[in-house]
Amino acid sequence: MKFVDEFRDAELGRVLAGQIAAAVEPGRHYKLMEVCGGHTHTIYKYGVDDLLPANVELVHGPGCPVCVIPMGRVDDAIAVAREPGVIFTCFGDMMRVPGGHGTLLEAKAEGADVRMVYSPLDALRIARENPEREVVFFAIGFETTAPSTALTLMRAKREGIPNFSVFCNHVTIVPPLRALLESPDLRLDGFIGPGHVSTVVGARPFAFIPADYGKPIVVSGFEPLDVLQSVHMILRQLVEGRCEVENQYARVVPYDGNMAALRVLAEVFELRPHFEWRGLGFISHSALRLSAAYAGLDAERRFRVPGVRVADPKACQCGEVLKGVIKPWECKVFGTACTPERPIGTCMVSSEGACAAYYNFGRFAREREVV
Amino acid sequence: MLERAVSEREQHALAMIERVRSRKPQFRDAQITMAHGAGGKASRTLVEGLLAPAFASEALAALDDAGTVEAGGVGLALTTDSFVVSPLAFPGGSIGELAVNGTVNDLAVSGARPVALTLSLILEEGLPAEVLRREVDAIARAATAAGVDIVAGDTKVVERGHCDGMYVTTTGLGHVDPRARLSPGSLQPGDRILLSGPIGAHGTAVMLARGEFELDAPVESDTRSLWPAVDAVLDAAGPSLRAMRDATRGGVATVLNELARASGVAIVVREAAVPVPPAVTGACEILGIDPMYVANEGKLVAVVGPGGADAALAALRSHPLGAEAAVVGEVRTEPPGMVLVETAFGGRRVMDVLVGDPLPRIC
């Protein structure tokens, strides 16, 4: 397929792998974090790991929108979905995330009208087609997906659609990264920067990572060659003693971000004082809620949500996985009590979650030479 | 290639997972969810954890596409399948053709020449007669094309809202071909994996026909009888043909996992060798779905011993149904029960059974 195959060229991959192997200093171990779950998915799906030398280790970060939703918010969503007359719409992955009292998929089987949508605009269309029902959209994601929620809300307000509202769980990328960098058990040499979110916020917001914490970051695209090239760029910074923000994904990411999208976000959303992240706890100013001008479309105001904080199951180590402190397989319940079919933690649900990616794709990939 | 040693702890964790995976699935769910019908792990739990143990039948426990029975010294194959596709008609076919070809193909890949079908219709109150007439015609045409008689049938009507237009169930009877010595447990290291043509068309055509994605692509269902292709492979490969599967719900990936598990062998697939039509690749790329998991209704996977693989491939290719047939992988010893993919990019990964519907990723 044109414009895709070029970024998956095996020959170029081998050339880049050779350059990476030549760039690393023998005896030194490099630990790089890919912040975004999309990168985690690419790395496992294409076996990018197999092309890296043994002393370059990739660890997975907190950038999977499904993975960071705490259990209490899932319970809130289920409570809204069970309200009489409600059509509750959400993305597919979110339906399988367990709260304290089951999943949205189970609520659907028990009679709640839960529908999978692919875009918030689909939810708005359902609201137009069912004027006698209350239609709620479960909004999740970083600044990547927040603009499409914002545009949908603007349209709903303009068209005066009274039966549409949004249960907002949008989060922001910089606060969790700062929290991560502040944690004392962190041992990282550099970051593969989140490309999708950077199409909106730009590369500029990551300048604090080299400036305040002395770690290089390269904003990266999502094809396997993008990831390999970004690894090479980070390693070159380390070898040459540089430490800066570089943009490998310049074909899509402007340094200052997408001004139109940022304006829309500023109009529709405001920062929450604090928000709970799965496994990471409460982080100040790390999430968005609807601004006063859009309060009428806020599902949290329209419906009573329990708002009860639910502690993560004791055995679940999603937090440590999200911080890159442990590998998925180091979690006590990985692959035994917690599997993609019966997930305990969110990282095992989304295909971008580190645990699901490792379980579905990574097992045995490099375990032994196949006879 | 740089081979990386995996720590003992990681190996220990992986071994633990395999122990858990190899346990017999237990059906413990409180209710049926859509995942139980998606052909992935939940469907397997339902079949292997509840249904197969309840009936204690040797033929059923083999979990083949058709069961076999001996009657008066004649080997017969018997299978049944229900069709609930939505929408009823889609580019390249409709529920009527599927209902015939799906059952015919379950017989064919079990090495049985399809002979006769029964037909059961569940109709929703209010279904337009022209829709029913259209589907009855489609059933008749498909049965003629597949060379099977429809010898018995039943109709029921349910109230509006209790069924989505129409559901169709067909039961098929076939005559086990004397050339066939097939068993999903007979795969041996060195065997080749053959695919009869490009994959993913049926599932993609139906998904796009639902109109949920506002995507348009020239993709048509591949629904057709596989018996002619099976006949050709049986002739060419003879006793070196180990097993065949019809790669329907769950796609080629699911079928390969079933075979690897049944034989306790590994299957390695070369991604670059798998034929996928460009329009299917494009649609799957946009929806975040792997074509290896997308349903086909006229593609078979055949496992053939090394001695017969070339002849089987040539036989498939000489047939109009199999012009793009390919050898896409082979059977190895390690790790047992697993399917691995050598990616076109040069890496390697596991290709497991899906957990539920292939849901598009969200960002």
Image: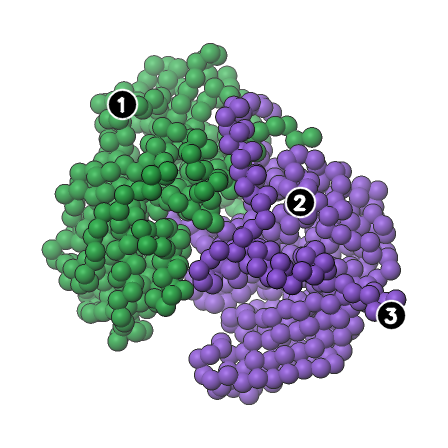
Q: In this image, B278 relative to A307: left or right?
A: right
Name the amino acid, label 3: Gly
What is the spatial separation of the Cα atoms under label 2 and label 1, in whole angstroms?
Answer: 45 Å
The residue beneath circle 3 is B72
Chain B: colour as depicted: purple
Residue A209 placement (x, y as % from top left):
26, 26
The chain ID associated with circle 2 is B
Q: Secondary structure at mark 1?
A: loop
Residue B148 position in % (x across, y down): 76, 74
Residue at 71% of width from left, 82% of height from top? B152
* Mark 3 residue element: loop
Decide if residue B48 is in sight here.
yes
Amino acid bearing label 1? Pro
User: Which numbered tag is attached to residue A272?
Assistant: none
Tint applied to chain A in the drawing: green
Residue position for label 2: B260
- Asked whether A59 or B183 is in front, the reply is B183
What is the number of the mark on residue A184?
Answer: 1
